[in-house]
Amino acid sequence: EVVSQVIYRNNGLPFRTQDWARLRKIAEGNPDASKVGAFGVGAYTMFSICEEPLVVSGKKGEEEAMAFFWKGDSLWTKTGKAPDGIINMSATLNNSNVQDNTAWTSFMLPSRDPYPLPDLVEFAKFLTASLTFTQCLKNIRVYV
């Protein structure tokens, strides 16, 4: 199988105004290489597989979104209400009819160059080791 898009979803804290502002700074570049933290290496990493990621965060009906897109050689962002058709709900992800007001954050990463599906056991080990620092996340789902 070939991976053409990866979606990471978590039910940690929804993005706040300052979180969206830090994420937007990625488009501006990082002027101080010694200051990499929240939305630092991890956020830059999403560009290693994706040209134009979409981030959606919040409760159903209240989702905010930030899209990254290129104009020439410049990376820009556009923020606002999540586009119609973008589902950011755990109830939908659980294939359940129960409406859930849990706030989810989703990172939608269409692959720049589709690649073979990685070994899932090795990928799970990587995620386990990578996400041990997260305190607010209760549930993480990866869709490929």
Image (spheres, helix red, strand yellow):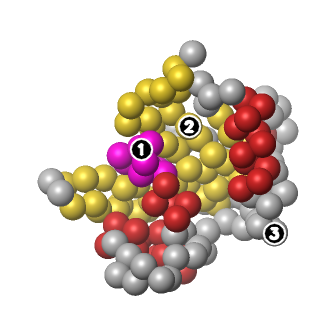
Q: Does dot 1 land on a helix, a strand or a loop?
A: loop
Residue flagged by tag 1: what amino acid is it?
Answer: Cys
In the image, is residue 90 part of the stretch drawn in magenta? Answer: no
Residue placed under numbered mark 2 in the picture: 6
Which quadrant of the view contains residue 19?
A: bottom right
Q: Which sits earlier in the primary sequence, circle 1 or circle 2?
A: 2
Region in magenta: 46-54
What is the x, y in percent for residue 33? Answer: 42, 79
In the rendered view, does 126 fall on the left or right side of 74?
Answer: right
Q: Residue at x 25, y 53 (%)?
A: 70
Question: Can residue 1 be seen?
Answer: yes
Q: CA distance from mark 1 to mark 2?
A: 9 Å
Image: 23 above or below 123 = below
Image: 35 above or below 74 = below
Q: Quadrant of the N terminus?
A: top right
Q: Does dot 3 land on a helix, a strand or a loop?
A: loop
Q: Nearer the viewer, residue 92 or 141?
A: 141
Q: Residue at x 38, y 31 (%)?
A: 113
Which quadrant of the view contains residue 102?
A: bottom right
Are the residues at dot 1 and dot 2 in contact (C-beta closer than 8 Å)? yes
Question: Can residue 84 be seen?
Answer: no
Q: Quadrant of the C terminus?
A: top right
Which numbered marker is on residue 135?
A: 3
Residue flagged by tag 2: what amino acid is it?
Answer: Val
Q: Which sits earlier in the primary sequence, circle 3 or circle 1?
A: 1
Q: Residue at x 59, y 24 (%)?
A: 117
- The local crowd at label 3, few if under 14, some if 14 to 19, many if 20 or more residues have their Cα within 10 Å, is few
Residue placed under numbered mark 1 in the picture: 50
